[in-house]
Structure formats: structure tokens, C-alpha cells
Image: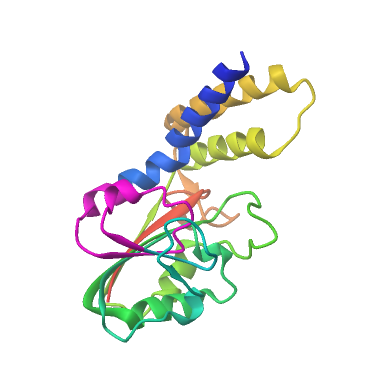
Amino acid sequence: MARTLDGARRALHRQLVRERITDFLRPHSTTRRVLDLGCGNSPYAHLFPNRMCLDIRRKPGAAVVADAHALPFADDCLDTILSTEMLEHTLEPQRIVDEIRRVLRPGGRVLLTTRFIFPLHDVPGDYYRFTNYALAHLFRGWSSVQVEAEATTLETIGILLHRLTMQAELRAQRLVRPALLVVAKLIGRLDWLMIRQYGDGARTRPVPEMLVSGWHVAGTK
């Protein structure tokens, strides 16, 4: 039973978060040289096999150990930078974005993901959450930038429920956790209930989604 539940939890996590990021990155998959900025455990290595892994801590596969606030590269020297789930863990996000822009060649691309409506994670190094408006501001002056929602409002609620099963101890958890995982998986299918959503309490400013778990950013210098 425990193995079955663990397998279900892993599968659900991949579907709700990891697979969404994979779907965003897959069209940009390449065998060309890519800087994987804040690579961690390199979950998307299969899409970028010729990546150069940079992390602030020495770990297996990290070819460069450095702080992303001061990248150890010359100006205009890289074609593509990948940065997944790092920006919210940095003390000066604008400095990070500016450093990415500095080392990219003209026309170079950054592929970045980060969190918005999401629980605390990897504490104490969890500092920021970003709206799409904040990301547009951070990337102001770029040639182009596209910011896409990772999930719908109800899918985001499902992601939050899933994280609850991962990060909380629950009463009667052997019964409660499977039930929450089922709800987390199914709630996103109720999007048809949503007629319109607003970005203000007076309901005067419609928005595509008022809750978003995270954002996928594709920027061109």
C-alpha cells in the first residue's frame, strides 16, 4: 500500500508541476550549448544534453559553482540560458535578470520558470513570489518577453492540495492523503464552472486567471 501511494504521489506531482514545465521547455530542446542556471538536480537535462550546469553549491554535475547575482562570464557570450525554479530563491531578482541579459548575445534567449501562488519551499532560502506584471517589469527593455500561466485557477488549487500532502503531517493521513490526491487530480477538470475571473474585488478588471501556481517566461535579448 505504501509503495502504491508513493508511486501515485510521484505521478501526480509530475502531472501537476514537472510535466507542465517539461511541456513548456520541450519545443526549445536543443543539442547546442546551454547554460543551466541554478541547475539543482538537473530535472530537464534530457531536453538540453549539452548544457553547462551552474549552481551556487558544489554538487554532482555542476561544472561551475558561482552566484547568479554575479555570473562569471563575459558580456554577450551565450546563446541560451535555462533557469527553472530559481528566481524566487534569489535575494535580488532584478540583478539576476540583468546578469542574464548581460551575458546573452543579442538575440539570445532565456527560458525561465518561477512561482506565484505556491507554499513555502526550500526554506529558509525562499524569498519572493511574482505576478506576471512583476515579471514584465523585471524584463523591461528586452527585445521581447512572453509570460505564460503554468496552470488555471482551479488547477492551481489542485497543485496547492498536492503540496499539502507533500509538506504537512495530517491526522489519519493514510486515509486523508489519498483522498486529497484524488481531489487535487480532479479539481482542474472543473474549469467549465468558471465563467469569468477578475483582478479586483469590484469585478471591473477581467483577467484570464486570478490564481496561478507559477509562470513560464521566454525572453529574447
Report the number of numbered marks.
Answer: 0
For residue 34, what is the image quadrant?
A: bottom left
Picture coordinates of residue 92 (x, y %)? 56, 77
Residue 141 visible, this orientation:
no
From the viewer's perspective, tell me whether residue 14 is left or right of residue 217.
Answer: right
Q: Is residue 37 magenta?
A: yes
Residue 97 versus residue 150 in the image, above or below: below
For residue 141, what is the image quadrant?
A: bottom left
> Which residue is at 65% across, 32% downward?
165
The residue nearer to you, when weighing 20 against 132, is 20
Residue with the most extreme right position: 171
Picture coordinates of residue 87 (x, y %)? 50, 65
Q: Is residue 120 magenta?
A: no
Residue 175 visible, this orientation:
yes
For residue 37, what is the image quadrant?
A: bottom left
Residues in magenta, as a range: 25-52
Picture coordinates of residue 105 (x, y %)? 24, 79
> Which residue is at 50% across, 78% downward?
69
From the viewer's perspective, tell me whether residue 204 is left or right of residue 51.
Answer: right
> Which residue is at 36% across, 49% downward?
44
Screen quadrant of the N terminus: top right
The residue nearer to you, when weighing 134 against 56, is 56
> Which residue is at 58% across, 55% downward?
202
